[in-house]
Amino acid sequence: MNIKVLTWNIRHGLTNEGYIDIPAFVEEAVSFEPDIILLQEVDRFANRSGAGDQVEEFRKGFGEGWESYWTKRLNFRGAGEYGICILSRFPIFEKKSYLLSDLNREACYAQEIIVEIDGLISVVNVHMPYDGYTGIVHTDRSWENLHAIKFPEDLILGGDMNVLPNTPEAQVFLSECMDIGEDRTTEFGRIDYCVGRGRAVPIKQEVMPSELSDHFPILTTFELQAK
């Protein structure tokens, strides 16, 4: 069985033209026909993005039967929240969030869902820190804690990692998983990933053409091998 996983940093719905347009992000995501979606930089009830619930807008856009899992990274002091989200057309049997570091005002989490697709599969969504914003200690602690988590062998891992493929941080998870990506995901290079291991074997990855965010959406097709 094959499934498609979409990984996308949506920059809280802020387009490259400088205005908020979540319906455009949702419409484009729907057009890619994914089965699971890993989103980063998502707002809920935030004044800066119109006080809407972006998680719910995505869920409604994909229709009946889709489930979502939200993890807050930052509270805008009464003016909304900011975080990461997984959406799945498969029922979610288990949800977990792992705090990687909260040494700065923006906490870093990895979120995990367990879904059953011809057996149980773990799907993990991460938005790793950026030194220039959070500081080196916060970033180092987050990577150390991510690498220490014992995720199941059958794993799909994706997100905005904020590191290039040739860095030591990237090499740790790339050495444990199968990665078939090659193309840059931002104008600065390839910093977004979607990889697999165990039964989750990536067989196709496309960096989709999009003019909406400062990150391109990544669509990865996984072959889920029989147990």
Image (spheres, rainbow, N blue to C red):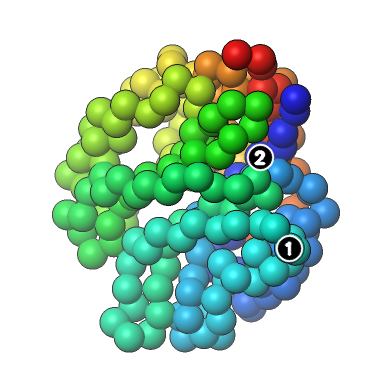
- Image quarter (top left, top right, bottom left or bottom right) of the C terminus: top right
The residue depicted at 42 percent of the width and 48 percent of the height is 95
Say what secondary structure mark 2 lies in: strand
Residue 80 lies left or right of residue 179; in this view the side is left
Depicted 126 relative to depicted 223: above or below: below
Which amino acid lies under the numbered mark 1 shown in the image of this protein?
Answer: Glu
Residue 149 is situated, as x and y percent measured from the top left of the image, at 29, 31
- The one nearer the camera, 46 or 66, is 66
Q: Residue 181 shows which numbered tag? A: none
Depicted 176 relative to depicted 22: above or below: above
How much space separates mark 1 and mark 2, taking CA atoms?
18 Å
The residue depicted at 73 percent of the width and 55 percent of the height is 29
Residue 65 visible in this rendered orientation of the protein: yes
Tell me where residue 107 sits by quadrant.
bottom left
Which amino acid lies under the numbered mark 2 shown in the image of this protein?
Answer: Val
Residue 110 is situated, as x and y percent measured from the top left of the image, at 37, 45
Residue 86 lies left or right of residue 73; in this view the side is right
Depicted 42 relative to depicted 225: above or below: below
Q: Residues within 10 Å of mark 1 (few under 14, many from 20)?
A: few
- The one nearer the camera, 88 or 161, is 88
The residue depicted at 68 percent of the width and 75 percent of the height is 21
Q: Residue 5 shows which numbered tag? A: 2
Residue assigned mark 1:
64
